[in-house]
Image (cartoon, rainbow, N blue to C red):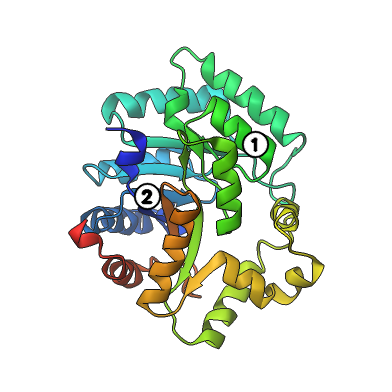
Amino acid sequence: MTLKQAVGPVGIWSMELRSDDPQQGQEAAEAAAELEQLGYGALWIGGNSTVAHADRLIQATSRVVVATGILSIWEHEAADVAEEHAALERSHPGRFILGLGASHAQLAEGYQRPYSTMRAYLDALDSAPVPVPAERRVLAALGPKMLELSRDRAAGAHPYLVTPEHTAQAREILGAGPLLAPELKVILETDTERARSIARDFLSFYLPMTNYTANFRRLGFGDDDFKDGGSDRLLHAVFAWGGPDKVRERVAEFHSAGADHVALQVVTGDRGVLPRAEWRRLAEILDLGSA
């Protein structure tokens, strides 16, 4: 089975699946098992996640692919990651994807020259006693250079906070072979004003980060789009909301633009809580039970 076949057309992206608290970790493990049964092809553990976080979810499931989305190259030594990856691959072969990212200057201590640092990190993974194979890692790529690196040194790209237009551009750079797995935020709310309020509150955390705004500028957005939690135009570009047909249409837009897999992040306005009811509803909307 190829990686594209293994992850399927849709998965779940969630920070709430990452927890170091035993009680919350147990709930996350139970949720992961349910997500597998619901038919999602991959689970992307949001934020600065680790191989250990993935291991816990893999142990709780039997077949779903689990990925870090992402592991920060600033906070984890490549040699340690390679060793942890090798151990996980021995115990659960083919179940894990190492998602790597350069994070942001606003979040990562010592942030500088992210492209060169990522190349050096990949070199270190390649030269480890048990290397991390390129076909088992993806990069959180936004700009053209990092997308090219995803094509040449990894199995593909996992861009976060992007639009269908970005997906089309990424596919052109990657070519047909590599995996393209963008993240898309979903609000299961039919009231437009309520959905926009939830979206603006959520997006306000990301808009101060220059990597994202620089990428949006390449896509034609400007300063006015970044004010007060985001313009209506920007919200519509990076969120899906509305009734079932609208949600299905937005997911289909990303697939039509070139995505092999769409990592869906359900946003409820209640951060820190596993949105299990919404995940069930989304599986029904996407008809995953018949997949």
User: Does dot 2 land on a helix, a strand or a loop?
Assistant: strand
Q: Quadrant of residue 217?
A: bottom right
Q: Observer-nearest residue: 189 or 176?
A: 176
25 up-or-down from 74: above or below: below
- Residues tagged 2 and 1 counted as in contact (Cβ below 8 A): no
Rendering coords of residue 114 (x, y %)? 71, 35
12 up-or-down from 198: above or below: above
Return the residue found at the far left: 290
Considering the image in quadrants, where does the N terminus appear?
Answer: top left
Rendering coords of residue 62 (x, y %)? 21, 42
- Residue 25 in sight here: yes
Front: mark 2 or 1? 1
The 10 Å Cα crowd at callout 1, few under 14, some 14 to 19, many 20 or more, is many
Rendering coords of residue 77 (x, y %)? 58, 28
Return the residue found at the far right: 223
What residue is shown at x 55% (from left), y 58% (from top)?
Answer: 164
What residue is shown at x 55% (from left), y 36% (from top)?
Answer: 174
Considering the image in quadrants, where does the C terminus appear?
Answer: bottom left
Q: Observer-nearest residue: 41 or 82?
A: 41
What residue is shown at x 32% (from left), y 47% (from top)?
Answer: 8
274 up-or-down from 98: above or below: below
Q: Which residue is mark 1?
A: 146
Q: How far, Cα to Cα, is label 2 from label 1?
A: 23 Å
Rendering coords of residue 244 (x, y %)? 36, 76
The 10 Å Cα crowd at callout 2, few under 14, some 14 to 19, many 20 or more, is many
Q: What is the three-letter code of the residue carrying label 1?
A: Met
Left or right of 162, for residue 129 = left
Q: Which residue is mark 2?
A: 43
- Residue 272 in sight here: no
13 up-or-down from 196: above or below: above
Which label's residue is closer to the chain start, 2 or 1?
Answer: 2
Q: What is the three-letter code of the residue carrying label 2?
A: Leu
